[in-house]
Amino acid sequence: MSAAPAASLERPDALRIEHLDVVYRIGVRELRVLSDLCLTIRRGESYGLVGESGCGKSTAAFAAIRYLARNGRVSGGRILVDGRDLMALSPGELRRLRTQSVSMVYQDPARALNPSLRIGRQMAEVFEAAEGLGPAASLERAAQMLSRVQIAGPERVLKSYPHELSGGMQQRVIIAMALSTNPALLILDEPTTGLDATVEAEVLELIGRLHAEFDNSILFISHNLPVVARMCDRVGVLYAGELVEEGPAASVFREPRHPYTVGLMRCIPAFGRRKNHGRLSTIPGFLPAPGSVVGRCVFEGRCGNATERCAREAPPLVDLGGRLARCFYPERAQDLPRQSETPAPPATSAPAGTSAPPGTSAPPGTPARPLLRTRNLSKTYQVSGKSFQAVHQVAIDLDAGETLGLVGESGSGKSSLAKLLLGLSVPDGGSEIEFAGEALPARAHDRTPAQLKALQIVFQNPGSALNRSQTVRRLIGRSLRRAGLFGRARETRLRELAASVRLTPRHLDEKPRQLSGGLKQRVGIARAFAGAPGVVVCDEPTSALDVSVQSAILNLLVELQNEQHVSYVFISHDLNVVHYVSDRIAVLYLGRLLEIGPSESVFSGPHHPYTEALLSAIPSLEDAAVKRIRLTGELPNALNLPSGCVFHTRCPRKLGEICERQEPPLHPAGEGHAIRCHIPAAELGQRSSSRVSDRSS
Amino acid sequence: MITQSAILRFLTKRALLSLATLAILSIVVFLGGQLLPGDVGRAVLGPLADARAVAVFNHQVGADRPLVIQYWDWISHFLAGDMGTSFTFRAPVAPFIGEALVNSLKLAGLAFVLVVPLGIAGGVWAAMHVGRLGDRGLVLLGQSLGVVPEFISSIVLILIFGVWLRWLPMSADWPEGAGPLTQLRYLILPSLPLVLVFFGYVARVARVGTIEALDADYTRTAILKGLSTGQVMRRHVLRNALLPTITVVASLLGYLAGGLVVIETLFHYRGIGALIYAAARAKDFPMLEAGVLTVGAVYALASVLADLLSAALNPRLRTIGA
Amino acid sequence: MSAGIAPVSLARERLNVALRSSTLIAGLAILTFWIVCALLGARIAPQDPYADNLLATLAPPSPAHWFGTDQLGRDILSRVIVGARDILIVAPLATLLGTVLGTCLGLCIGYLRGALDDVVSRVIEAVQALPLVIVALMALAAVGTSNTTVVLVIGFVFTPLIARTVRAAVLVESDLDYVAAAQLRGDGALAIMFIEILPNVLPIAVVEMTVRLGYAIFFVASLSFIGFGIQPPSADWGIAIAENYSLIGSYWWTVLFDAGATASLVIGVNLVTDGMSSVFET
């Protein structure tokens, strides 16, 4: 990123927040969501605001555009946008400010566009409002903006309705709309969360390029630290409504001076780090309820460096020469003791009444046959006369105690594959699924209780995965009943399970709405492990959780695997997490297996061109200089698959005609490694091995 | 992109669905009329009638044939325009139904024209002031009016406007050859209870739709673009808010046309509701069945129209299901 | 996310909201009044509701007869009090029947889906096309009218309507992962429907029941008015209005108080419904 330009004397700062307090009224109480926030974004600068959920970053963004929710209000401080006091503006002036000086782009582009109006209409509105242009002239300007955001064929897009465009396109349209009037300040609130990795990389690149072209200031809000590191000149870290650290992005991330930032950075699995290198760090404790911490440091309850002073006094923001930190001991931040939760008490061996899944009793090391095997696994849907191949001829093997990571973007078929394995969806004829040497009935309905116990799942969204009308005890207890446990034995096993996922007995009688996301996910894990399963499918188990909670859950999963010798099919879009947790990795694209092999080999190469592009799209804290491999074109329509190799329409290494005519078979490329490509393995891309970091954090 | 053929396919699909619904309805109505009473003849002639008279009656009306044949006979004639012969009048049913339907549609039309704009305006207004006194008041008012039976509100209105103030005629039985304006004057009072009952319903749906649209992300985008409140409401909110209202309003039309039993009886109005009621009292099953099926057909037609309108306003619907 | 997100139990929170809801309390007050009237009936009536007094027919309201007298000289106030009984038996019973059947049906078609859902939904749509009064008329014309048949007919007529609402809620629940989790541990369809899903759709069914209760009273009153509901010689309000309607021009009191009683009852139920939905929204 370019160095921050010097503050211009003629033009005021794009955004200046001075001692901002924001409260929300819930019921009869008022909760303080932002405290004493001070923040300045100079002209042309890009500023990243990071924090986990509940820290108040979105509130800050909405306050800056004076669009707080009905029950929110600014209870103190000032906000100056482009030199003007936001709270002192009349409605008419506010509207003009929103038209001309500040724009916002937020998450979920599909919902930000009016589904009943064509794109052209929605974009033209901006010009009509800002410059008073007529409809024809506005449309022309709109077309120009679309070209600037690299949308080919702008006329066609202008005539389309939002639901006819892909997610990435929609977000570009929104960015185009936001930049139409060349605002002084552009606010981006989690603009790429929810987009695929490759699409995200493109959108981020676009934002970076436009930032240079348009020379506006950017407030970039995200929970994703590597993305912020890449996009922003300066960064501010928010925790529980307070700014705890601020400074140039490179310097803050390289050498954080606040214990929270230090903890946060350590939670993220470093690129190349694997589970056998050791557990991930966590931040112990929980986020305090808003407004509950008064008169002391807001992070004190979770800080390994905390002293008595921290519990008695609230530290001010200390200026460390170009950097700010809200801590009494910033110089000691780096020495924060590494926290990993203590290992849980080992669960006793499978209790009487449940039989250990066949095939898992063999100790690791003996060449057991694969625990789970699929051959020709396919699932085709019929949609208005055409076939949609969600999963096509996928063959995977999974050994006992092993983790297979499933990687793919939207449309890859990884969720469909999970459902097929579990029996929640019926595969096409000719598909084979084998468990412990026996053919597995396709539908869960037809499987024996032993088979059902053996194959379990941990869901992505802990909120919907738990029946909100049941207590934790009942939730886990019902699974135990199905596993054949009753009465005293069940109660004992229940307590063991709870302990193994670090739930206290108090939690057993609570209902899901009383638990945090991380705790709910632990309940889900306990439930999956109730019957001592052989294989657990983990479907994006940490995607809905904050970074600091994620590391604790990942540690738990690895621990349970080590103790109980269970296998995982680990689905995730986060490649670093997959790399950390998996022994082997399978890459899916449009329902097809493009590559499968040991994690190291898949990551370092030689690997499939798609894998290569995926890996280059990961924003990483370590190396910002990775040359991103751009994929041309868009994801093909699943109803109209390309002939031959499904990837050839976007492949940067496309050989030629053979890729269009013939679907490549899986070629071996090393020990246990297979790649579906016409290009011989030796000529495929490799990541240089120096990439693999040996940071021991 | 949206093609002509896609729209055509959508329409055809909807029309077929409606026909299927009507077919099922006709079966249900027929079974209701033939099965429920057990023995048709017995039901009509009463428990004291001679068994032979009952048998003769049943044979005359063809009630002793197999059910499927009876149904087929009935429905094929119905579709050709012959709705059977009334037990009471011993005359073809169709003309009665025709005249009554026209009358009911007039009354329903007036009520419709009054309640829809009022209800939508009320609902949108309430949504814009959601949570505040005006909103709560409107919702409660609408709901309260909605649950008061029509005959109650009719009586109160008759008392006020007919007896005490003497502004409007108490029965809708206008003299022969009355012009449209006179007919209107007679129709106002009977339409008011309908308006009261359905105001709450329409307002509620409009309110919910508007609230959802106001809370939507795209409304936020529009506001943050700097558009004025009027522009935001007109261009973004109302289009999406009123979509669900349309479907509901269409079903309203069907209900209005038939649910007038009580009102038409109270006001001595010769509409289809009164016809059905009289047929029910007299156990005139052919008339009863024909009347009920006609009402169902009106409703089905109204919902197809509503779907058309929805598709015209909602681009997504045109491609889904095509 | 913080731990202890909702430290108070759901039941307690709902109770709090309930106690503060003025509409709920007002509605319950009205309902209680009429329930007491229905239960105690003649015992709290100032005079004998069935006693003819041919010397004082059609007397306007006065200190002796607060609501006046009817064609047979009977005290209208007493009759109004006693008239609450039949409707407060028939309407709730019908509603209960419809709710129980409708909830079960809605659970089945919402969870099992497939051909069953397609067929039943079509039938429901078809039947919905008809106004309830008409359907009730047809059915009652066929089977004859008595309190029992009215309960059955209205109950069956409500079943598809309630089933539709419950089905929509069940569809939403079925998509949630906890249902898949139950399937994966081998729970049968019955267990999933009634043990897993039902507790989560129960609030909706309860609100729907109170809404339907209002309509049930509406319909029973209307049907009684046109002679297809509660049968004479009950002092039911609908019948009283029908009997005296032709006198409305000169003897308004014979009709107005019964009408007012009916209106107050339905409004009371409506207020309770309103209060309940805000309680269950938490």
Image (spheres, helix red, strand yellow):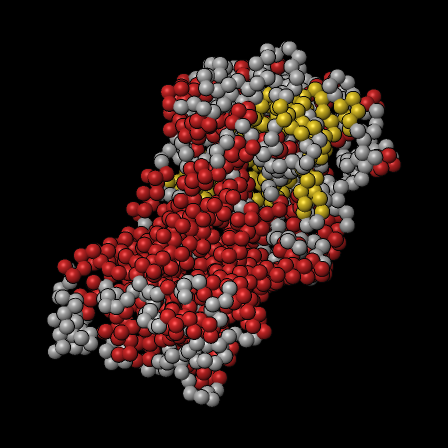
Point out the image quarter for the N terminus of chain A: top right
| Depth order, front residue of B41/A563 | B41
Q: Residue furthest front?
A: B52
Residue A357, compared with residue B113, is above or below; it is above
Residue drawn at (33%, 76%) of the image:
B158
- How far across and down, in percent of the image, does residue C35 sit? 24, 56
Give the quadrant of residue A159.
Answer: bottom right
- How far across and down, in percent of the image, does residue A640 sit? 75, 44
The answer to whether residue B115 is seen in the rendering is no
Residue drawn at (53%, 63%) of the image:
B68
| Depth order, front residue of A211/C169 | C169
| Depth order, front residue of A597/C243 | C243
Residue drawn at (67%, 29%) of the image:
A432
The answer to whether residue B40 is seen in the rendering is yes
Q: Residue furthest bottom?
A: B177
- How far across and down, in percent of the image, does residue A653 sit? 82, 31
Residue B154, compared with residue A229, is above or below; it is below
Q: Residue furthest right?
A: A657
Point out the image quarter for the C terminus of chain A: top right
| Depth order, front residue of B231/C10 | C10
